Image (cartoon, rainbow, N blue to C red):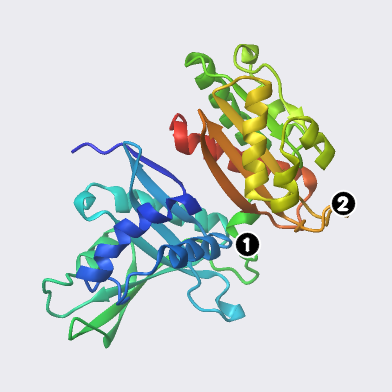
């Protein structure tokens, strides 16, 4: 089977697909030492908590999630700030097709940009392979450049048997006398050049496929719309958008007042309604709704949380909503770049046009 693999950020909405991949590992293997399959609510919390600091990514094959990977804290004390621990899970029917390799390469790349220097893989292992556990993961990580295996003997008990763990490491960067502080995943600020490249590819894709796009933007104040129209020929797919900086502006442009009153202007529900309202104003296949607060508390809205942004992408009434956390110590322009990048990723996760 030929696999065209698309790597993208994990979304909270992916939880069910990811849990379906993870569950057989819990129930039928000793690859994870977890005994009980977590609930969907617990799994969503894990995605949210981990992705607030570290990369959490998925691999799609033909539009279906077939694997995922993430990094998490290796040790919590300050001196360990430049370390992380990796986890990779691939759908059992898709193992051996390069998905795990691509996930790990992308994970390492992102962590290196965060200034993580040491990546650790803590792998369930055994001195005698059985129906529950092989040493395939140890062999895989060795091929991927992981070294210095350290074995903890008989530290995990599952299926009435004792299993070992093997910890392996890989250096992602140079160790200097004055290391650059490690940063959170969400602290990355993409360059405007990269953002222009991405949005140019979006506009060209929409022109080619005769798909129109519109937006209702609050905190980004028209920035995403501007990026869409920076490419020549955009008038064929973009008829208009609106900036709704206040609650009143949102209501005037079609957002139900009761939604704002019941859920708050800064909420996934309001972003969702914004994505619907703009499509009604400017009939389009794609509608974008963005609401949130950057660096300061909004005195007009008590529910504002600095750095919390809500993005909705409506593609033919199939709506994906994302709650996105920004670092509050970056500038408003940098915040707009980050939100534009996240919005692009949400669109691309549905249309799969940008590799």
Front label number (2 vs 1): 2
Residue 217 visible in this rendered orientation of the protein: yes
Vertical arrangement, residue 221 with respect to residue 187, above or below: above
Vertical arrangement, residue 269 with respect to residue 36, above or below: above
The mark nearer the N terminus, 2 or 1, is 1
In screen coordinates, is 160 left or right of 201? left
Judged from the image, the secondary structure of the residue bearing numbered disc 2 is: loop
Viewer-nearest residue: 114 or 254: 254
Residue drawn 52% across the image and 18% down it: 211
Location of residue 313 by image quarter: top right
Viewer-nearest residue: 58 or 308: 308
Mark 2: few/some/many CA within 10 Å (<14, 14-19, 20+): few
Viewer-nearest residue: 317 or 235: 317
Q: What is the C-alpha distance between the residues marked 2 and 1? A: 32 Å
Q: Residue furthest front?
A: 258
Residue 335 visible in this rendered orientation of the protein: no
Viewer-nearest residue: 200 or 283: 283
Residue drawn 82% across the image and 53% down it: 301
Residue position marked by numbered label 2 in the rendering: 300
Image location of residue 343, percent across then percent down = 60, 39
Tag on residue 183? 1
Location of residue 108 by image quarter: bottom left
In screen coordinates, is 329 left or right of 181? right
> Which quadrant is the N terminus positioned in?
top left
Image location of residue 123, percent across then percent down = 30, 72
Image location of residue 197, percent across then percent down = 58, 29
Location of residue 62 by image quarter: top left
Mark 1: few/some/many CA within 10 Å (<14, 14-19, 20+): some
Image location of residue 279, percent across then percent down = 63, 26
Tag on residue 237? none
> Which quadrant is the C terminus positioned in?
top left
């Amino acid at each position: 089977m030929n696999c065209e693999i698309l790597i993208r950020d994990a979304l909270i909405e992916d939880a069910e697909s990811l849990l379906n991949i993870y569950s057989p590992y819990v129930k039928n293997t000793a690859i994870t030492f977890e005994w009980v399959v977590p609930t969907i609510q617990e799994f969503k919390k894990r995605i949210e908590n981990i992705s607030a600091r570290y990369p959490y990514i998925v691999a799609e094959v033909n539009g279906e999630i077939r694997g995922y990977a993430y990094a998490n804290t290796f040790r919590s004390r300050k001196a360990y700030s430049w370390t992380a621990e990796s986890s990779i899970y691939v759908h059992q029917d898709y193992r051996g097709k390069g998905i795990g390799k691509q996930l790990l390469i992308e994970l390492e790349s992102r962590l290196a940009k965060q200034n993580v220097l040491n990546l650790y893989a803590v792998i369930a292992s055994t001195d005698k392979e059985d129906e529950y556990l092989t040493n395939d993961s140890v062999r895989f990580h060795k091929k991927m450049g992981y070294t210095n295996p350290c074995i903890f003997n008989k530290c995990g008990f599952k299926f009435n048997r004792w299993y070992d763990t093997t910890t392996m490491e890989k250096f992602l960067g140079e160790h200097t006398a004055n290391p650059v502080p490690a940063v959170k995943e969400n602290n990355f600020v993409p360059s405007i050049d990269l953002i222009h490249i991405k949005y140019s590819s979006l506009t060209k894709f929409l022109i080619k496929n005769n798909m129109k796009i519109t937006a209702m933007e609050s905190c980004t104040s028209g920035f995403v719309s501007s990026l869409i129209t920076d490419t020549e020929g955009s008038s064929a797919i973009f008829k208009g958008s609106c900036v709704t900086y206040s609650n009143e502006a949102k209501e005037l442009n079609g957002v139900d007042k009761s939604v704002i009153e019941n859920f708050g202007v800064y909420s996934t529900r309001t972003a969702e309604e914004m994505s619907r309202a703009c499509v009604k104003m400017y009939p389009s296949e794609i509608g974008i709704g963005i609401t949130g607060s950057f660096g300061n508390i909004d005195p007009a809205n008590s529910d504002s949380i600095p750095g919390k942004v809500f993005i909705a992408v409506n593609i033919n009434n199939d709506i994906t909503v994302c709650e996105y956390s920004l670092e509050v110590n970056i500038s408003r322009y940098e915040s707009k770049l980050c939100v534009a990048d996240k919005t692009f990723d949400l669109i691309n996760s549905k249309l799969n046009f940008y590799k």
